[in-house]
Amino acid sequence: MQRLGAISADNHNMNHLPIAVLGSGSWGTALAIQFARAGKATRLWGRDAAHQAQMRAQRRNARYLPEAPFPERLSVTESLQEALDGVIDVLIAVPSSGFRSFLEELAPQLSSGMYVAWATKGFEHGSGLLPHQVAHQVLGDNHEVAVLSGPTFAKEVGAGLPTAMVVASPHAQFARRIAEDLASPVFRTYISTDIIGVELGGAVKNVIAIGAGLSDGLGFGANTRVALITRGLSEMTRLGAALGARAETFMGLAGLGDLVLTCTDDQSRNRRFGIALARGGTPQAAMSEIGQVVEGHRAARILREVARQHQLELPICEGICRILFDGADAGEVVRELMRRPARAEFE
């Protein structure tokens, strides 16, 4: 992973242009605030016209980030055409379940010189594809792409608390430009060319976080939680090797960093979902209690299928699938994981 360096001539020529952030949920709003806070002219788009009008009038997203006022350089629009006018860089912030359909809607409106990034995490339901693979199917090779990931909660980014994240792209100059546009004294950005590893870390960590929430909800203590996190990282790394990712990516912000954050802080929907499951409710009841999309629930079954395709043993992810979809008892699954036969830690 490379640290930020000098601004290239290409990036310098583009840094005066606005960026379009498409998706005005909590994460899209937080990133739009950060771009504008760092000095970038930013357009925040959402398809709910009434919500966009409310944000424009109140200069904040009262629905998702009510305590984060909009910087002066952030504008709000419900017109996709207006959001894209004169823009080179586009950032998509929609859930993984709607990523393909939104790309298909967006593609005809993208000019050939535009770059496309996303802050979407998780596998595509049904296909098991990562977001960059979906983007390739929809956009072809017509646009350079990038992904933003790392240990970040929208509320803390919106509040301006110190944060670090990574931007990954096969096109290093694009990754550097997005990273530089986000960077500020309280927001540290790094770049990577390992888009597979960065996306995989963002997908797998949600499944492991469900296990950590289950463990804590069952009262198994800090030792068990740390064991699940550490061995979950091992499973993430093994799957990454099979898919062509670089091992060092999983020791960075998008791997270990995001995994620890999601497994240990109750701002994580996936962790809270696991805690709710530990109380004995069904997955459907637990999701209703959370009241938002629980990405790890969707990802768990896909992760099991991908692991089987590559003939990989991922016992934590398999165990969580058994709880979610096969009716297995959560306490017994965790105990089974702890009773597995001794083996070398690194193989």
Image (cartoon, rainbow, N blue to C red):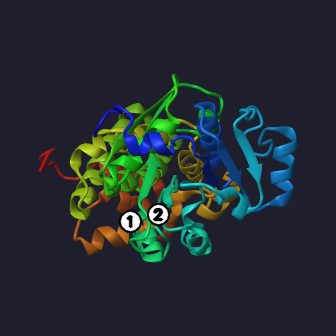
Q: Is residue 78 above or below residue 134?
A: above
Q: Quadrant of residue 283?
A: bottom right
Is any part of residue 243 visible from this angle? Answer: yes
Residue 67 lies left or right of residue 252; in this view the side is right
Q: Secondary structure at mark 1?
A: helix
Q: Nearer the viewer, residue 247 or 212?
A: 247
Q: Residue at x 22, y 71 (%)?
A: 311
Residue sitting at 27 percent across and 59 percent down? Answer: 239
Q: Residue at x 40, y 47 (%)?
A: 175
Q: Quadrant of the N terminus?
A: top left
| Three-letter residue code for mark 1 | Leu
Residue type pointed to by label 2: Ala
Q: Secondary structure at mark 2?
A: helix
The reply to whether residue 167 is visible in this rendering is no
Left or right: 183 as drawn, with respect to 38: left
Real-space Cα separation, disc 2 to disc 1, in angstroms: 6 Å
Q: Nearer the viewer, residue 108 or 247?
A: 108
Q: Quadrant of residue 104?
A: bottom right
Q: Which residue is mark 1?
A: 303
Dot 2 and dot 1 residues touching (CB under 8 Å) = yes
Q: Position of residue 108 (x, y in %)?
A: 59, 75
Where is residue 77 shown, x and y percent of the image?
76, 54
Q: Which residue is under mark 2?
A: 299
x, y (%) of residue 306?
Answer: 33, 70
**Neighbour class for label 1 at 10 Å: few (<14), some, many (≥20)?**
many
How would you rate the neighbour count of disc 2 (Cα within 10 Å): few for under 14, some for 14-19, many for 20 or more? Answer: many
Q: Position of residue 230 (x, y in %)?
A: 30, 41
Is 51 in front, or is 228? 51
The image shows residue 98, relative to residue 256, as above or below, that is below
Farthest residue, direction top = 185
